[in-house]
Amino acid sequence: MITVTDSAASKVKELLDEESDESLALRVAVRPGGCSGFSYEMFFDGEMADDDKSTEHGGVRVVVDPTSAQLLTGATLDYKDGLQQTGFSIDNPNAQRTCGCGQSFS
């Protein structure tokens, strides 16, 4: 399952609070596509499947489907807010190579 840093959990919690919907969780998924074969997808989701994997980090529920969970084992979701980089990033030890834009991997 994916690990969420404190800074990422804090930012997700802030965004979830703006939604004002207690049923929402952060869904992290891996989908076919992108320059290198797979791309990451993150969105707020209120619908959970019986076989979804769920965990909580810093008051934020994170949900991953079983197929994505296999590709995200050991991965870390982080959030940076600075001059050099702003936004979410996933450090995935399962990625053998990434594309130039950093949005997809294989």
Image (cartoon, helix red, strand yellow):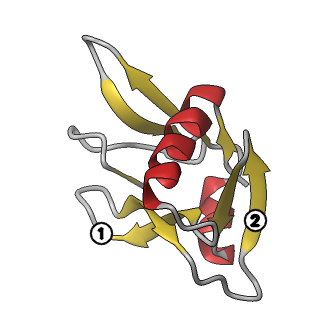
Residue at horizontal 43%, vertical 52%? 18
Which residue extends farthest front? 20
Q: Nearer the viewer, residue 76 or 79?
A: 79
Q: Residue 15 at x, y = what percent?
A: 45, 48
Q: Residue 8 at x, y = what percent?
A: 55, 35
Q: Earlier in the sequence, mark 1 or mark 2?
A: 1
Q: Nearer the viewer, residue 85 or 60?
A: 60
Residue 30 lies left or right of residue 87; in this view the side is right
Q: Residue 98 at x, y = what percent?
A: 35, 43
Disc 1 secondary structure class: loop
Residue at horizontal 73%, vertical 39%? 58
Q: Which mark is residue 33?
A: 1
Is 79 situated above or below 69?
above
Quadrant assignment for the C terminus: bottom left
Which residue extends farthest bottom? 50
Query: Disc 2 marks which residue?
Result: 54
